[in-house]
DNA sequence: CTAAACCCTGCCCTCAGGGTCAAGGTCAAG
DNA sequence: CTTGACCTTGACCCTGAGGGCAGGGTTTAG
């Protein structure tokens, strides 16, 4: 299949597919005219990349999953490295939620502070 | 004061100060030799920008706060536009926390799923 | 006089692509 | 055979908030 077929079936853009290749995640054959051709495995790979990116992994972090798939496993996440990647990402998300929670508290403090300051000023004006 | 004095006193880098200028947040005088010179007000502005960026606002979103400061207010956040910006940012943070919470649930589901799949495979091997 | 410390502009880099372009290939209808 | 529609290729600039480096001018201390 050509790149636009692959992109359509995987639900991504042609541009994205070329980007994954530039990151070393795909190595399509080339026809005599230079066109890339993709296999059914490549389709699974691109679907996996899409799913992992939507989980907030970087393209680089999808590497172990892709290796796991290409090793012949039905699922990309049954290899130890994939489980580790999941756990690492969960820890990142937890940290980020904590940060944002603190941030929200700071923001509401600032907001109520600024509001009350305005009220005081209006009253004493 | 020169740029490195300003940067040191505000706790940011020289590069950051020049970036704020490129975003239209500062307009320093230039000496005959081309060196930028900053006022005490500029120092307050840079400190304010730093604080707002650490709250996750974009440089562009700091604009109303800076205007408020330059209008002669003691605080950058007592103007109506600043309060609106705070509320907008709080809403963004809330949305982001919700997204990350959903994401975390998806990740733990995937993780336990992959773990149990591995266990089943080991048992039936 | 010289070296250190400071200042300037300008270019390339991040990350996951998006947008746009020119050039060329492929396939059908006319 | 040609036209047109559609496909592909590589190449370039863009994002946000700067970091890093190059190359050059200026100022200050010894």
Image (spheres, coloured by chain):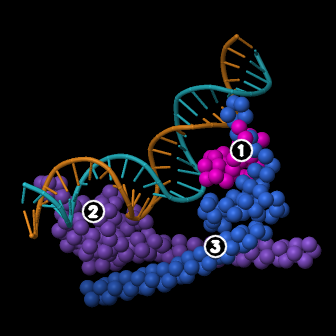
Chain colours: A blue, B purple, C cyan, D orange
Q: Secondary structure at mark 1?
A: loop
Mark 3 = which residue?
A89
Residue B97 x, y percent position in the rendering = 59, 76
Badge 1 sits on which subunit? A
**Residue at figure coordinates x 64%, y 46% from the top left:** A18
Residue A41 x, y percent position in the rendering = 79, 52
Query: Which quadrant is the N terminus of chain A positioned in?
Result: top right
Residue extent of the magenta highlight: A1-30
Asked if labels 2 and 3 touch by Cβ distance under 8 angstroms, the answer is no
Badge 3 sits on which subunit? A
Residue B81 x, y percent position in the rendering = 38, 71
Mark 1 = which residue?
A28
Neighbour class for label 1 at 10 Å: few (<14), some, many (≥20)?
some
Asked if labels 1 and 2 touch by Cβ distance under 8 angstroms, the answer is no
In the visual, does B106 lie left or right of A102?
right
Badges 2 and 1, same chain: no
Mark 2 = which residue?
B26
Instruction: State yes or no: residue A14 in magenta.
Output: yes
């Amino acid at each position: 299949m050509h790149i636009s077929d692959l992109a359509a079936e995987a639900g991504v853009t042609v541009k994205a597919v070329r980007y994954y290749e530039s990151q070393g995640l795909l190595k399509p054959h080339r026809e005599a005219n230079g066109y890339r051709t993709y296999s059914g495995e490549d389709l699974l790979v691109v679907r996996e990349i899409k799913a992992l990116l939507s989980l907030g992994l970087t393209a680089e972090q999808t590497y172990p999953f892709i290796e796991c798939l290409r090793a012949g496993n039905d699922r990309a996440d049954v290899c130890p490295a994939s489980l580790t990647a999941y756990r690492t990402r969960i820890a990142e998300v937890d940290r980020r939620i904590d940060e944002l929670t603190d941030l929200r508290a700071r923001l509401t403090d600032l907001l109520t502070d600024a509001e009350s300051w305005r009220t005081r000023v209006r009253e004493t004006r």
